[in-house]
Image (cartoon, rainbow, N blue to C red):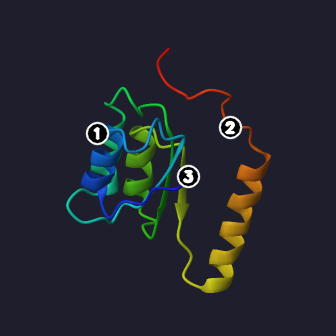
Amino acid sequence: MVTRAEDGIEALEIINSGRTTNPFFILLDINMPRMNGHEFLKELRKTAIASDSVVFMFTTSDSVQDIARAYRESVNGYIVKPHNREDMNKKISTLQEFWTICEPPVRPVGPV
């Protein structure tokens, strides 16, 4: 199931309300209104419900500071959005191939 949020505050509300249970994978942008991606990631890692979710930043920022901060905040991967359709399609194709060969957890990830 795919759930979409407009910003970090809405995403945390969705996770904390139980509308989605134990998200396995979160695709996150840094540039969001109300709560940016760094702030969201910091808050997410504090929650018991989704602290161990796999989180990838998918953003336009190629700033060394943003990348370093994301990894300090325990992001699992950082992808800079390409500027043209062809490169975007290549990155999406690569991600689809990657997730096709990955084995999802047999049971929900989280505290036992």
Mark 3 surroundings: few (<14), some (14-19) or many (≥20) residues within 10 A: few
Mark 2 surroundings: few (<14), some (14-19) or many (≥20) residues within 10 A: few
- In terms of depth relative to the viewer, which is nearer, 33 or 21? 21
User: Type of residue at label 3?
Assistant: Met
**Residue named by callout 3:** 1
**Residue named by callout 1:** 43
67 with respect to 98 (left or right): left
- Viewer-nearest of discs 2 and 3: 3
Check contact, mark 2 vs mark 1: CB within 8 A.
no
What residue is rendered at 76% in x and 51% in y? 100
Tell me the element at label 1: helix
Residue 58 at x, y = what percent?
A: 50, 62
**Residue named by callout 2:** 104
- Viewer-nearest of discs 1 and 3: 3
The earlier-in-sequence mark between 1 and 3 is: 3
- Rounded to the nearest angstrom, the CA distance separating label 2 from label 1 is 24 Å
Residue 41 at x, y = what percent?
A: 36, 44
